[in-house]
Image: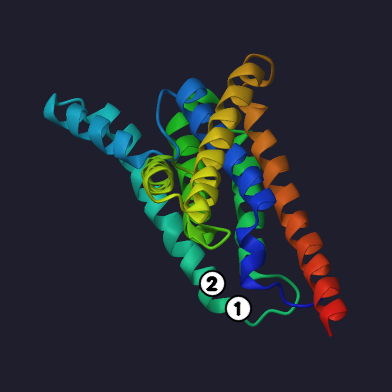
Amino acid sequence: MKKLRGQISESRRLAILLAVSGGFMDAYTYTFRGEVFANAQTGNIILLAINLSEGNFEKMLQYLFPVIAFAFGIILAEVVHRFCTIDNILHWRQYTVLLECIILFSVGFISQEYNMIANSLVSFACGIQVESFRKVKGNASATTMCIGNLRSGTQNLFNFIFNKDKECLRKSLIYYGVIFFFAFGAVIENVIIGFCKQYTIWCSCILLFAGFLLMFLQAEEEDKQTCKLK
C-alpha cells in the first residue's frame, strides 16, 4: 500500500465525516454526560473558573480533566505524526483516526456513574482529531469546533461581497459547510440518544472508521489520476 499524500486528509468528503462526528461528540458529552463539552474547551474553562470561585471543587474537576485530556490528545497526535511518518502501510492520520475509534468505542461501556472518565476520554479523542486534521482544501479549518470557522467564513464572505473575489466565496462556503455538518452531527446525536443511551457514541466510531476507509479510496483515485497524466 502506497503512502497517502498529505492533501488526502484535506478533502471535503473527509471533512464532512469528521465534522459530523465532531458535533456528535460534543452533543453526546453535553446531553448525556453531565453538560460537559468534549470540544469546546473555552466553555469548560469558564465553567471550571465559575465553580472554582464558588468553592465547588468536586464539580470543578468535571471540567478540569476534559481540558487536560484534550491537551494530551494534541500531544499524542504529534507523537504519532513524528514516529509514523515513514510507515508505508498507513498514513499517520489514519493511525490517529483508529485511536479515536478505539477510545470512543470504550466510552460506550462506561456508565453514567463515571462520567468524568467518559468525558475525559472523549475530549482526549477530540484533541487527537483537532491536531491531526487542520485543513480543508488547503484552508485552515477545524472539524471539532466552530468559532474559527465562523470567523474565517464570515471574513471571506465579506471579501467576496466587497471585492467580488469568487475564490473568497468558495472558501466561505467551505467554512460554513463545516459548521453546518458539525451542527448536523449534534442534531443526529440528540435524536438517537433517547434510544441508544451511552452506546450512542458508537455512531462516531462508525463515522470515523468511514473516514479511515475513505482515505484509502481517495489515495487510489489520486494514483489513477497521476497515472493518466503520465
Q: Quadrant of the N terminus?
A: bottom right
Q: Position of residue 131 (x, y in %)?
A: 47, 59
Residue 202 in the figure: left or right of residue 229: left
Residue at x 70% of width, y 42% of height:
207
- Residue at the farthest bottom position: 230
Q: Secondary structure at mark 2?
A: helix
- Residue at the farthest top position: 194
Q: Position of residue 181 (x, y in %)?
A: 59, 35
- Could you tell me the amino acid type at mark 2? His
Q: Where, by quadrant of the figure, is residue 224 drawn?
A: bottom right
Label 1: few (<14), some or many (≥20) within 10 Å? Answer: few
Q: Nearer the viewer, residue 8 or 212?
A: 8
Residue 214 in the figure: left or right of residue 133: right
Q: Secondary structure at mark 1?
A: loop
Q: Are marks 1 and 2 in contact (CB under 8 Å)?
A: yes
- Could you tell me the amino acid type at mark 1? Thr
Q: Quadrant of the C terminus?
A: bottom right
Residue behind mark 2: 81
Q: Nearer the viewer, residue 62 or 16?
A: 16
Residue behind mark 1: 85
Q: Is residue 81 above or below residue 180?
A: below
Q: Position of residue 113 (x, y in %)?
A: 48, 24
